Structures are given as C-alpha cells and as structure tokens.
C-alpha cells in the first residue's frame, strides 16, 4: 500500500514575500541568513531524531532529494503567505519528491510557520497529525527546508520510507538471489518471463524452456523476500528451473516506486 500523510501547523500566519534560496551544508536556507537558517534546519532535524529515540523509533537519515523537494515548496509557501501542502499549479508532494529524485513507498509532510525552530518542533509534537508523521517508525528518511521572511520561519519536513532504486536487470538479479537457496537453476533466456510479467494472467505465448508449471506475479517496493505462495511452491521440491522477468509497475498512483516481477517455475 502506498500512503501520503500531510499535516499543517500555523504557529504564526503572515503574508510575506521572500527572495531566492541557496544550499548550505545539506540544509536549504534563505539568501542573506544562511548561518541562522542552517542552524534552524539542523535543530529541527536533531530534535526530530531525539524525539524518535525517546519513543522507540529509528533515526531518520538525511535525504538530499527530499530536501530539494522541501526547498521548492518552502519557497512557494513563504511567497504565498498562508501555508498549505499544495498551491494552484503546484505538483503534490509525491510528484515534487519524485521529480527531485526520491524513491519511496510512503511519504509524509509537515509544514509550519513559527518564530523559532524549537517552537515549530514543539507544535508538531503537540499536534496529533504532525506527531504521527514525525514519530512514524515506518519512515526512515527526511529532507528539511527552512526559509526566513519578515521575522518568522517557514519550515517544510518531507519524510519517506525509502526504496532502493533498481533497473530491470538489477531487480531480476535480486530475485535470483532470493531463489538461490531453493536450489532451482535460473533460466538465462528470460524473454517469456518478461512477457508474463506484462500480463495480468495466463501464460506467455512461447518459451524455449518449455511450458511453466507455475507462474507467480507480484508487485512490491520491498524485494527483501519472496511472496509466501512462491516460497511454498519452492519448498515442495517439485521444481528444478526458474525463469525471472521484470517489467514496469502497473496502476501506480503518484510517483511511488514499486517493482513488478514474474517467476516461472518448471
């Protein structure tokens, strides 16, 4: 399942204009206030990980692609005045993060305007939606942007559950690794498996390896293990060969990352 979770905290709402931003360290800040804004972003990042440690959630890793998505939205937010997760003509958070190069199966966003980084963090921790996003044990990466304008801070934190980016050959190689303990031989010519992957059901038109006795198709962002039904078939000891094919994921909303695979057993 792919999820988007959004939350807004308006500690202080003002209509402002803001100039361009530049990157410092990995944190994004407004021109002319680099030191203070870098410290504000670093403080929000540190406070988030302190809170997660206190509540048994793993630490967030910094992600530069998420930070770029957050920066673009933070600049727009400061220019607009009233804060929001999306303005007219602007992509939503999944598209912003995807266009910036992030790969994810879950994404969340907290936005706020407030006087200090500590107060923004405190407001997030006392707001159920923000707190849930910040402490969610299912997310493992974050990008934070802070922009200063007319005496206040605008902040965007984009959190996600990262997905390793792989091409088709890498996906097939990963699945082959998972199949290896079963002892089945991997068929080198995998054109039929790739064809089967693109199909919703049925068998591929032809296969040099013969007619498969079992076909497993699945789609997931996590390739750390095989589907239970496939593991059960392999455990039966009935099969000697396997053909693996990957193809583009189907019916994906937003810019979520997932991999579609077919395994043919002979």
Image: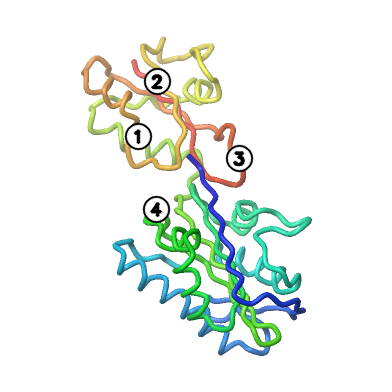
Tell me the distance, in whole angstroms, between the alpha carbons under discs 3 and 4.
20 Å
Q: Which residue is mark 4?
A: 138
Location of residue 7 with respect to 242 vertically, above or below: below
Front-most of 114 and 76? Answer: 114
Single out the mark in the foreground, 4 or 1: 4
Q: Which residue is mark 3?
A: 253
* Badge number at residue 246: none
**Secondary structure of residue under mark 2:** strand
Quarter of image, res 177: top left
Q: Which residue is mark 1?
A: 176
Seen in the image, is 242 located left or right of residue 166?
A: left
Quarter of image, res 21: bottom right
User: Percent position (x, y) of residue 236?
Assistant: 22, 18
Q: Earlier in the sequence, mark 1 or mark 2?
A: 1
Labels 3 and 2 touching (C-beta < 8 A):
no
Q: Residues within 10 Å of mark 1 (few under 14, many from 20)?
A: some
Single out the mark in the foreground, 2 or 4: 4
Tell me the distance, in whole angstroms, between the alpha carbons under discs 1 and 2.
12 Å
User: Percent position (x, y) of residue 114?
Assistant: 59, 78
Q: Which residue is mark 2?
A: 264
Tell me the distance, in whole angstroms, between the alpha carbons under discs 3 and 2.
28 Å
User: Residue at (41%, 76%) from the top-left corner?
Assistant: 46
Question: In the rendered image, which quarter contains the C terminus?
Answer: top left
Q: Earlier in the sequence, mark 3 or mark 1?
A: 1
Q: Earlier in the sequence, mark 3 or mark 2?
A: 3
């Amino acid at each position: 399942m792919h999820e988007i979770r959004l939350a807004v905290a308006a500690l202080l709402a003002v209509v402002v204009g803001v100039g361009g931003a530049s990157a410092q360290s990995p944190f994004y800040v407004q021109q002319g206030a680099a030191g203070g804004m870098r410290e504000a972003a670093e403080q929000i990042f540190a406070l988030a990980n302190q809170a997660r440690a206190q509540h048994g959630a793993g630490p967030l890793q910094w992600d530069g692609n998420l930070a770029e998505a957050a920066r673009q939205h933070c600049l727009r937010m400061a220019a607009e005045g009233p804060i929001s997760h999306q303005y007219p003509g602007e992509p939503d958070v999944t598209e912003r993060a995807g266009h910036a190069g992030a790969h994810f199966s879950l994404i969340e966003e907290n936005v706020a305007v407030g006087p200090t980084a500590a107060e923004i963090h405190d407001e997030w921790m006392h707001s159920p939606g923000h707190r849930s996003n910040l402490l969610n044990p299912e997310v493992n990466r974050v990008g934070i942007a802070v922009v200063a304008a007319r005496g206040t801070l605008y902040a965007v934190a984009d959190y996600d559950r990262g997905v390793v980016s792989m091409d088709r050959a890498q996906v097939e190689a990963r699945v082959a690794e998972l199949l290896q303990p079963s002892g089945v031989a991997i068929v080198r010519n995998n054109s039929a498996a790739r064809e089967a992957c693109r199909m919703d059901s049925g068998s591929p038109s032809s296969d040099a390896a013969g007619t498969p006795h079992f076909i497993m198709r699945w789609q997931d962002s996590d390739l750390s293990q095989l589907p239970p039904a496939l593991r059960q078939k392999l455990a039966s000891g009935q099969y000697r060969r396997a053909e693996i094919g990957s193809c583009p994921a189907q019916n994906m909303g937003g810019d979520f990352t997932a991999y579609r695979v077919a395994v043919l057993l002979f």
